[in-house]
Amino acid sequence: MGKKQAWVCYGKWKIQYDVHFVDRKTLEIAVHPDERVEVKAPLNTTQKEIQKKVNKRARWIRRKILYFKQFHPRTPARQYVGGETHLYLGRQYRLKIKKLKKESVNFSGAYLQMFVNDRHDRVRIKELLEQWYFQKAQINFDSCFKHCENFFDKQLLSPKFKIKRMKARWGSLSPQKKLTLNVDLIKYPKECIEYVIAHELCHLKFFNHGSAYYRLLEKIMPDWKKRKARLEQIAI
């Protein structure tokens, strides 16, 4: 898959976008929550054709960028100190850090209680918390996946998924039908996690975002727009 960067002007604004050349029939434009504009174009598409399409959708692109800007600034960078709030399944928990040789993380009411060797070792506290998030993600994503797969033809489904940290995407489905989920989804409500999984599983049948794709998504998850909006509005 090739990749190029380009830009167009819309009034006084300069819209920069990434172009990915992929084996597909139609051209797709997406605006991500981090305000990154991404174009997926068929392999034989010319730069002139892409620019014409982006120019045509420039008003829509600018409107989407402004929509995402209203949620900035996002939550400040975490310091991993006691009393700081962290999200888990859509709820805020405060860190309670205690010294103990046997390190662990668990719930204690409205707190995430962490036991560490050194209460001032922020690097270790961050590392331990991220390990805990990955463990919880594996359990909860598996539960959400099993719930969502009931709505699909079993012959279509990819039997496994993997979890990793992704900078600008919540999930992806490769041409080889391998599902990848962003570990940070564990910070969101289950309804949002289910939306991302359903969104990606619909690509097993329709790899683009055409009308047939959205009819399928609407059929299996009638409230997907509400779930998507909540996903976009929560700051982490």
Image (spheres, rainbow, N blue to C red):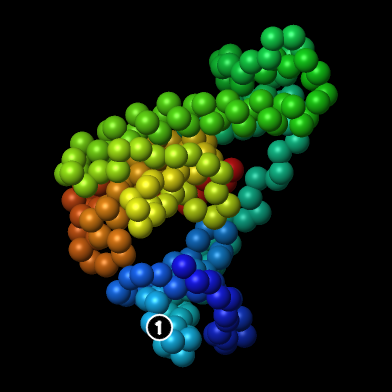
Q: Position of residue 156 (x, y in %)?
A: 21, 47
Position of residue 196 relative to residue 101, above or below, is below
Rendering quarter of residue 116: top right
Rendering quarter of residue 17: bottom right
Position of residue 235 relative to residue 119, above or below, is below
Determine whether, in the image, residue 120 is placed left or right of residue 225. right
Choose between 128 and 9: the one closer to the eye. Answer: 128
Q: Is residue 123 at all visible to an observer of this figure?
A: yes
Does dot 1 land on a helix, a strand or a loop?
Answer: loop
Q: Please give the name of the residue rendered at 33% of the width and 36% of the height, measured from the top-left corner.
A: 145
Q: Please give the name of the residue rendered at 32% of the width and 75% of the height, measured from the top-left corner.
A: 26
Choose between 115 and 111: the one closer to the eye. Answer: 115
Q: Is residue 55 at all visible to an observer of this figure?
A: no
Position of residue 185 relative to residue 92, above or below, is below
Choose between 70 and 157: the one closer to the eye. Answer: 157
Determine whether, in the image, residue 172 is placed left or right of residue 15. left
Q: Position of residue 122 (x, y in %)?
A: 78, 30
Position of residue 181 relative to residue 108, above or below, is below
Choose between 54 and 153: the one closer to the eye. Answer: 153
Q: Please give the name of the residue rendered at 49% of the width and 53% of the height, measured from the top-left corner.
A: 169
- Residue farthest to the top, as pictured: 101
Q: Position of residue 23 (x, y in %)?
A: 36, 70
Q: Position of residue 45 (x, y in %)?
A: 40, 83
Q: Please give the name of the residue rendered at 20% of the width and 63% of the height, measured from the top-left corner.
A: 212
Q: Quadrant of the C terminus?
A: top right
Counting every numbered tag in the picture gives 1
Mark 1 belongs to which amino acid?
Thr
Residue that mark 1 sits on:
45
Q: How many residues crowd around disc 1 within 10 Å: few (fewer than 14), some, or many (20 or more)?
A: some
